[in-house]
Image: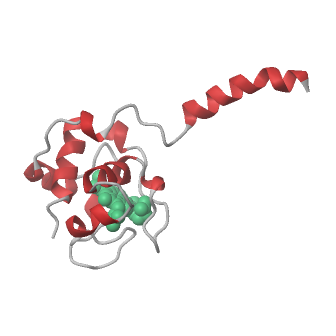
Amino acid sequence: MRALIRLLPLLMIVLVACSPEKLDFAYDDLPPGDPARGAELYVRSSGGSASCQSCHSLDGVKGAGPPLDGYAGVAGERVDGKSAEVYTFESLLRPSKHLVRGYSNVMPSDYTDKLSRQEIADLIAYMLTLQ
Ligand code: HEC
């Protein structure tokens, strides 16, 4: 029992370090995004991950992920009190945090490693133009 208690702090550190929720930067730390550049990134594979387009159509057709046409209009209403920008930031970098109803948790969760902060900002700016 005593050994277990001694191990507890270590366990906590390991848990926190491995927590998928943890990001060491926030939406506000990003540079201004360029939607035109984001549109290019959307159709391109990033560091070996599937392109956004391969799971997210822009014409209402369901794929592995929800279609993203009309996304700009709903992003700010997905989670109470969360702006469209912050919701998109979290959906892109920590997809398991907010799951869209009817879809599985299959979106790659390593875009933080595959995309630069500029690219993340560009993609978010682009997604928030999708009518
Ligand atoms: C392997 C398939 C896959 C790829 C690749 C993928 N996604 Fe997703 N994405 C999903 C799925 C499935 C969901 C719904 C479940 C969830 O919310 O995580 C989702 C959810 C989202 C949402 C939330 C949508 C909403 O209506 O609330 C956004 C935004 C998003 N993805 C953006 C992107 C972007 C940008 C890329 C490319 C950098 C990308 N996704 C790549 C599968 C994918």
User: What residue is drawn where x is 22% and y is 51%?
Assistant: 124
Q: How many marks?
A: 0
User: Quick check: 116 above or below 56?
Assistant: above
Quarter that holds the N terminus: top right
Q: Quadrant of residue 87?
A: bottom left
Q: Position of residue 59 (x, y in %)?
A: 21, 77
Choose between 111 and 21: the one closer to the eye: 21
- Figure colour scheme: secondary structure
Lateral position of residue 54 relative to residue 19, left or right = left
Q: Residue furthest right?
A: 1
User: What residue is drawn where x is 55% and y is 38%?
Assistant: 19
Choose between 100 and 112: the one closer to the eye: 100
Lateral position of residue 97 relative to residue 63, left or right = right
Lateral position of residue 98 relative to residue 62, left or right = right
Q: Position of residue 11 (x, y in %)?
A: 70, 29
Q: Position of residue 117 (x, y in %)?
A: 24, 36
User: What residue is drawn where x is 21% and y is 72%?
Assistant: 70
User: What residue is drawn where x is 49% and y is 42%?
Assistant: 21
Quarter that holds the C terminus: bottom left
Image quarter for ligand 1: bottom left
Choose between 106 and 34: the one closer to the eye: 34
Residue 62 in sight in this render: yes
User: Quick check: 104 above or below 122?
Assistant: below
Q: Residue furthest front?
A: 81
User: Quick check: 63 above or below 22?
Assistant: below
Residue 51 in sight in this render: no
